[in-house]
Image (cartoon, helix red, strand yellow):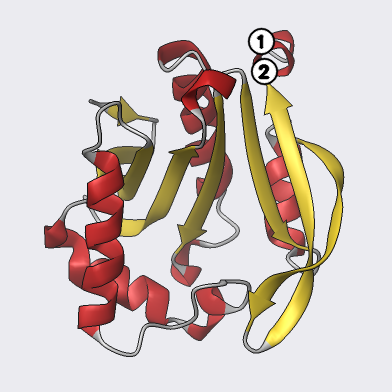
Amino acid sequence: MKLQTDRLNFRQVSTDDINNIHELHSLPETDKFNTLGIPETIQETEGIIKEWLVEQNAKPQISYVFCLDLVDTNKFIGLIALNIGKPNYKTAEVWYKIHLDYWGQGYATEALIKLLDFSFNELKLHRIEAGCAVENIASSRVLEKVGLIKEGMKRKKLPIRGEWKDNYFYAILDEDFYSSK
């Protein structure tokens, strides 16, 4: 499977990515709104990757976790993923995490647009959902910029660093995506 934009290559995650993913997950800035918390050891990160690989190798495939690499340099800059819940609902949840050195440069937006295109045109999904902490203004902007609609807020849903945080939930339908083109 080959996904690419003008600036980004998407490739399915593998165990070879452990060091890059561990570094990304270990940054306090990228952990600020993360429910997983910072992995204490590289073995913990390896366990996370192994879980992703099990889901990625399931038949039918229920998860797509992509490393995002810059086209020009092949430098790893982040992750984006699509998790398909119940296949008969044709619904999936998307998440992304970009290394802080690449924040504010449009990479999350670019990657998410491509993933939505893949979701609706290749996988023939009907609905893509996402959530983010209410305080995560940058992520809310990305979701809204690509056409996801804020459908509501769930109170104290996210366990983040020992506290319960409110969560906005967003979605886009295939018909929304096609009408915006």
Give above or below for 120 relative to 112: above
Q: Position of residue 99 (x, y in %)?
A: 44, 66
| Rendered view: 52 above or below 110 | below
Q: Describe residue 152's horizontal placement relative to residue 147 as left or right.
A: right
Distance Cα–Cα, label 2 vs label 1: 4 Å
Q: Residue at x 32, y 28 (%)?
A: 3
Residue carrying label 1: 178
Please state the horizontal and vertical placement of residue 10, each as a whole percent of the image: 31, 39
Binning the other alpha carbons within 10 Å of mark 2 as few (below 14), some (14 to 19) or many (20 upward) gives some
Q: Amino acid at mark 2?
A: Phe
Q: Nearer the viewer, residue 107 or 128?
A: 128
The residue identified by callout 2 is: 177
Could you tell me which residue is drawn at 20 percent across and 73 percent down? 19
Q: Is residue 14 left or right of residue 149?
A: left
The answer to which quarter of the image holds residue 47 is bottom left
Please say if the residues under marks 2 and 1 sit with CB atoms less than 8 Å apart.
yes
